[in-house]
Amino acid sequence: MNSEDIEKFLNKKATLAEACVKITFKKRASIFGLFLREPDFKDLKSKNFWRIVPESRLTEYNQSKNVSLARIYCGVEFTRLTPYKETFE
């Protein structure tokens, strides 16, 4: 996916820093994660990279707000983004 499509999805379907998103990749297993806006959102977005906290570390992130718990993913590898709520419907 390109950065414009990802950002459009995040603006319309998912509230950043509040809602998990299911991210489906081309060559790896899907993950649930939280897209982060800080500290370098604009810089990473311009290169189609995204800082995401995986669901397995979400509780720890919510307590500490430690950005180092996030991983950086390349948007080109994304095939689909789905809001967490719609995943189970």
Image (tube, rainbow, N blue to C red):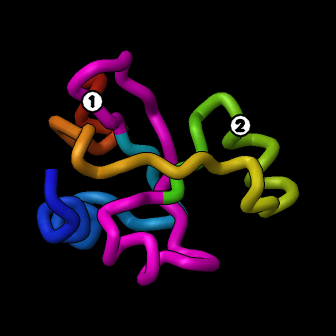
Q: Residue furthest front?
A: 47
Is disc 1 placed on a helix, strand or loop? strand
Percent of width and height locating residue 47: 33, 69
Residue drawn at (29%, 23%), measured in percent from left and top?
88
Identity of the residue drawn at 65% across and 50% down = 70
Give the residue type at disc 2: Arg
Q: Is residue 43 magenta?
A: yes
Image position, residue 8 (x, y; %):
16, 69
- Element assignment for label 2: helix
For the residue pair 25 and 35, the one nearer the viewer reads as: 25
Return the x and y of residue 33 as percentages of the image width and height. Answer: 49, 41
Residue 67: mark: none
Q: CA distance from mark 2 to mark 1?
A: 18 Å
Residue at numbered disc 1: 24
Pointer 2 or 1: first along the chain: 1
Residue at image location 58% in from the left, 34% down from the top: 55
**Foreground: 10 or 73?**
73
The percent coordinates of residue 83 (x first, y second) are: 29, 44
Answer with left or right where residue 57 lies relative to residue 78: right
Q: Quadrant of the C terminus?
A: top left
Q: Is residue 65 above or below residue 41?
A: above
Q: Which residues are magenta?
A: 22-50
Up the image or down, 53 lies above or below 80; here it is below
Residue that badge 2 annotates: 57
State the image quarter where residue 2 is shown. bottom left
Q: At 63% across and 78% down in the image, what residue appears? A: 39
Q: Residues within 10 Å of mark 1 (few under 14, many from 20)?
A: some
Name the residue type under label 1. Answer: Thr
Give the quadrant of residue 59.
top right
